[in-house]
Image (cartoon, rainbow, N blue to C red):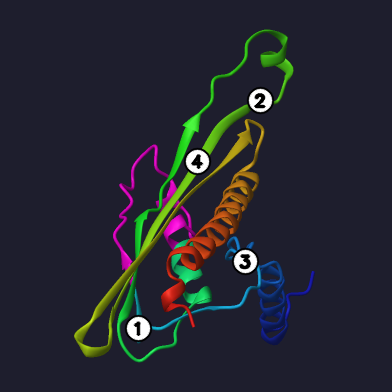
Amino acid sequence: MTALPATGRLCLVLVLFLAACATPPAPPPGDVAFVVRAPLNLDVAAIVLDEQYGSPARPPHVEHLHRLSPAGVASAWSRSRLVAAGGAGAAIFSILDGSVVSEALEKKGGLTGLFGDQQDTKLTARLKVRMAVERPGPAGAHGSWTAEAEVNATRTILESASLNDRDAAYAALMQDLATRFDEEMSAEIRRSMGAVLK
């Protein structure tokens, strides 16, 4: 067999390299999506994010193992929904809990346990946020308002689930938590902070 000339070998290497690059790695799970709603315009000059929750970063907690966490959901929500539309005062958006706990589920025995595809993991996500508004008023008067929301969401995973399936279950859990939080926090702000909504 005749050896390829140098230019032929170079072309072959480039073709192989391009073929290897043709199949990119799977992208990470996408960010959560919120229902399109009108922004919450607050009569304050600034909105301050206060991330008080810090993950223990050890079992049974798993939020630190994923790109998106409940705290990330809350942070994204504050950027998506809250608008500082005033000239004075501030809204402090504090994330108090943003945990996801993984729990191993007990397996059934007998034929069901032997042949059935059982749920083997339960994920429980929690998100608790408090928003406090401090605003100076006329003639030295001072006003303060508080809104708080706490939501939970759960997801179970089959023992046969692949790593991709488990990642998808976690992403679905975050989307469910985001939807619940959006509804709860929006309603609470409208209920308890009507005086500072514009």
The reply to whether dot 1 and dot 3 touch (C-beta < 8 Å) is no
Mark 3, residue position: 33
Residue 146 at x, y = what percent? 35, 64
The reply to whether dot 3 and dot 4 touch (C-beta < 8 Å) is no
Mark 2, residue position: 118
Q: Give residue 46's mark.
A: 1
Name the secondary structure under disc 2. Answer: loop
Span shown in magenta: 49-72
Give amino acid for label 3.
Answer: Ala
Q: Residues within 10 Å of mark 4 (few under 14, many from 20)?
A: many
Residue drawn at x 57%, y 54% as measured from the top left: 180
The reply to whether dot 2 and dot 3 touch (C-beta < 8 Å) is no
Q: How many marks?
A: 4
Residue drawn at x 30%, y 83% as measured from the top left: 89
When asked about the image quadrant of residue 85, the answer is bottom left
Residue drawn at x 47%, y 78% as measured from the top left: 197
Give amino acid for label 4.
Answer: Thr
The residue at the far front in this view is: 139
Residue 67 colored magenta? yes
Q: Residues within 10 Å of mark 1 (few under 14, many from 20)?
A: some
Camera-side residue of 143 and 34? 143
Residue 145 at x, y = what percent? 34, 68
